[in-house]
Amino acid sequence: MGLSNLGIFHTIIGVVAIVSALISFIRYGKINLEHITGKIYFYFTIITALTALGISKHGGFNAGHVLSLIILVLVAAAFYLHSKKKGNNKARYFENFFMSFSFLLSMLPTVNETLTRIPFGHPLAKNINDPLIGKTLLIIFVLFITGSVYQIVKQRKINRSETNSFEF
């Protein structure tokens, strides 16, 4: 497998972030920063993205590092919207999208690294161009689109119910 100590730490923290996000998606339909699963995703994703900056399979700054920086910006923006724009219902759309998009972007290296390393000695995919990786990412992308539409519809209902509750 050939992981450094930083790589092992990065992987463990990243798996916890992904599991937390999945639990939050199942429970709340989004990565919900109000609840512990969303908070774990937020903090562990920051740690994972920062540790990714110290990892390089091919030497030097690469696309994976850029992806980590984008993920950091997305989760920071979502956290800002969550904490500073509480009364702004329109901000929830962006908060939800930023968190979900950060999860989608996190899945790109996760799928590649997992399928090209596991099972040990005989990985499921030979390299990044393997059709299995492409098909897996396509399924994840379709789930992302479906989930995003669901989140928009659900948020619209929440916003309408909050607006209607203020009418006399």
Image: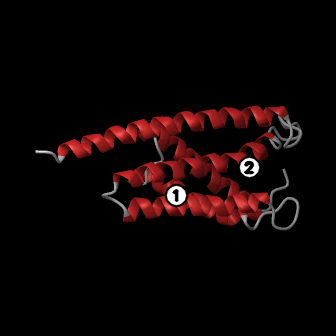
Up/down of 116 relative to 67, above or below = above
- Residue drawn at x 62%, y 33% is 142
Q: Quadrant of residue 122?
A: top right
Mark found first going from the N terminus, 2 or 1: 1
The residue indicated by pointer 2 is 109
Horizontal side of residue 136 vs 131, given as left or right: left
Residue 135 is labelled as: none
Q: Identify which amino acid the numbered label 1 is placed on.
A: Phe
Q: Position of residue 19 (x, y in %)?
A: 57, 45
Q: CA distance from mark 2 to mark 1?
A: 18 Å
Q: Is residue 4 visible?
A: yes
Percent x, y of residue 157: 33, 37
Seen at 58% across and 63% down, the residue is 73
- Of 56 and 140, the residue lying toward us: 140
Where residue 42 is drawn, which disc sits there? Answer: 1
Kind of residue at disc 2: Pro
